[in-house]
Image: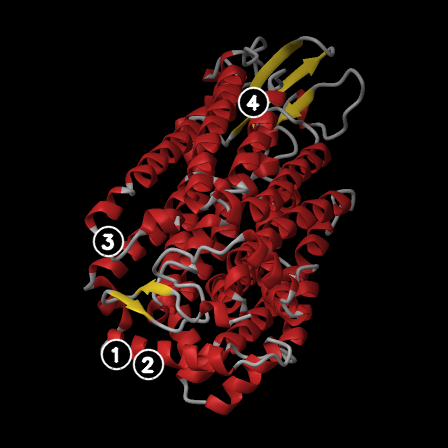
Amino acid sequence: MLSQFKDIKVHSFMGHKTVDDGERSLIGPPSEESPESLLDQKASTPIFVYVLAFFSALGGFLFGYDTGVVSGAMLLLKKEMNLNALWQELLVSSTVGAAALSALSGGFLNGWLGRRICILLASFVFSIGGLILSLAPDKVVLLVGRITVGLGIGIASMTVPVYIAEVSPPQLRGQLVTINSLFITGGQFIASVVDGAFSYVIHDGWRYMLGLSIVPAVLQFVGFFFLPESPRWLLQKGRKQEAQQVLSQIRAGQNVDEEYDTIRTSIEEEEKEAGGGLVIFRILSHGPTRKALIVGCGLQMFQQLSGINTVMYYSATILQMAGVRDDKQAIWLAAATSATNFVFTLVGVWLVERVGRRKLTLGSLLGTGLSLALLAVGFLLSAQNSPPVTLHPVDSQNSTCRLYRSCELCMLDPDCGFCYRDNGTTVFDSSCVPVDQASTDHAAWGRCSNRTEGPDSSIWAYNYCPTSYSWTVLMGLILYLAFFAPGMGPMPWTVNSEIYPLWARSTGNACSAGVNWIFNVLVSLTFLHVAEFLTYYGKTITSSHHHHSCRDIHYHSKVWDKSESIFNLKKYL
């Protein structure tokens, strides 16, 4: 099976070289194989490779679960712990910030401890974080748990794709790395279902939502006790006999002498090419690897600026902002969007080797940009048709809330809420009044200060306005995820696992993952306040603009092919 790769020409770091390469070149274009050859190769792939990919991708599942579960849990937490917008943003972004720090250190940890130990460490830390979250007595301990979980997620985010790439057969590497993204979206979907199931638990439902993440973390931890280290890393550390044994185990006893020699030769060439000093300086000092790093980090940056994790972290909150009144209904509708994300990630796994990275990414960017525009239109229509304030209570207590003349303006002030009556078709007797500082569930005074709600009683709305345009926002979310999931979801991770020369792979992945987490922090930490400042439709218009900017940049990156024949990105993407 491996002999057909003997004479593959690869674009090396220093120039064109012909080497025995048992792996797909990570800096040049993939080798061109006939469909019949690929089918034969896939049929002979040992099942153990899929076992390795499954347990590795549980790290992606944990990331996805944490991303998805916080959406529904936040609706319960902000009521039970009376969280303001800042605390909501802190609880979301603290995990992301911790992940950014641990991801940036991941390259060093990968080289020092190895891929297997890093994944074990990540799952152990995540388990501890999940335990803290499930037992947290207050928001401060909850914050500690979120930070702990983030440390585990960050290490896993840049280790898992590298490990999968190094144990996968060349012809399956793209699909198996993409499976990590499939597990991320699968984790998000499972989390949304868990959110929906426990939304009926009035008290402490959020503990079960957050605490159940321990199960996959423990499963991965136990599983990796019985799984091998990456043979490439073992060879890099001079553990030659162990590397050959592991390679033979992964390939199910097939003759691995040729592949072993290939990996050993490529490592020796990498060491010559990399030279001494820090790898990051070596990457930045040479054009091909510097451009690879720019592409890799740029894809990760624009993935976050497109707003994907804002959508996943705050999907239930966004739906409430769009006029969905009931918490349980908002959580289940958020589950529908997560299901869309999961299903269309499956489409991406099927398309990745058929369409190509570049076309899939460009199509994804175009579709998601238009979907965000639809989302913005939904919020804009809701704002333009926002119910007016028709009733001005005499006992206004000099509150600034009395100055607002519509529900839209009232909602943008975190100290105010909308009190109204509804006969099914018309909103009437509507007022903008102060919220109770002890609980956002009711007004500080007046007719909406009563927590009970009868058929003819007034309705209290704290973070939404009654509207008939909620379906537009829901449709925008579903279309956004349908376009995002096959392309911009997995492609930044897949491309980053493949475009660096092997000596720069760990450091390149660490840098790109760090960029992903840093921009994730910026977006998640500021979403609620930016939404208040720019209005809900202004925020989504901004994300749409970022998307189209990324599409233009990625499209015009083909000029690199003309200026740098050594580093042919267009063919590879």
The CA distance from mark 4 to mark 1 is: 71 Å
Dot in front, 3 or 2: 3
The CA distance from mark 1 to mark 2 is: 6 Å
Dot in front, 4 or 2: 2
Label 1's element? helix
Is 268 on the left or on the right of 130, as rendered? left
In the rendered image, the vertical position of residue 1 relative to residue 38, given as above or below: below
In the rendered image, the vertical position of residue 406 relative to residue 556, given as above or below: above
How far across and down, in percent of the image, does residue 105 sit? Answer: 39, 69
Q: Which disc, if any, is residue 4?
A: none
Is 34 on the left or on the right of 474, as rendered? left
- Along the line of sight, which residue is nearer the eye, 75 or 536? 536
The CA distance from mark 4 to mark 2 is: 71 Å
Residue 333 lies in quadrant: top right
- Write down the residue under mark 3: 565
- Write down the residue under mark 4: 433
Q: Are marks 1 and 2 in contact (CB under 8 Å)?
A: yes
First of labels 4, 1 by sequence position: 1
Is 195 on the left or on the right of 227, as rendered? right
First of labels 3, 1 by sequence position: 1
- Write down the residue under mark 1: 272
Q: Tell me the residue at 46%/89% (across/down).
A: 240
- Write down the residue under mark 2: 268
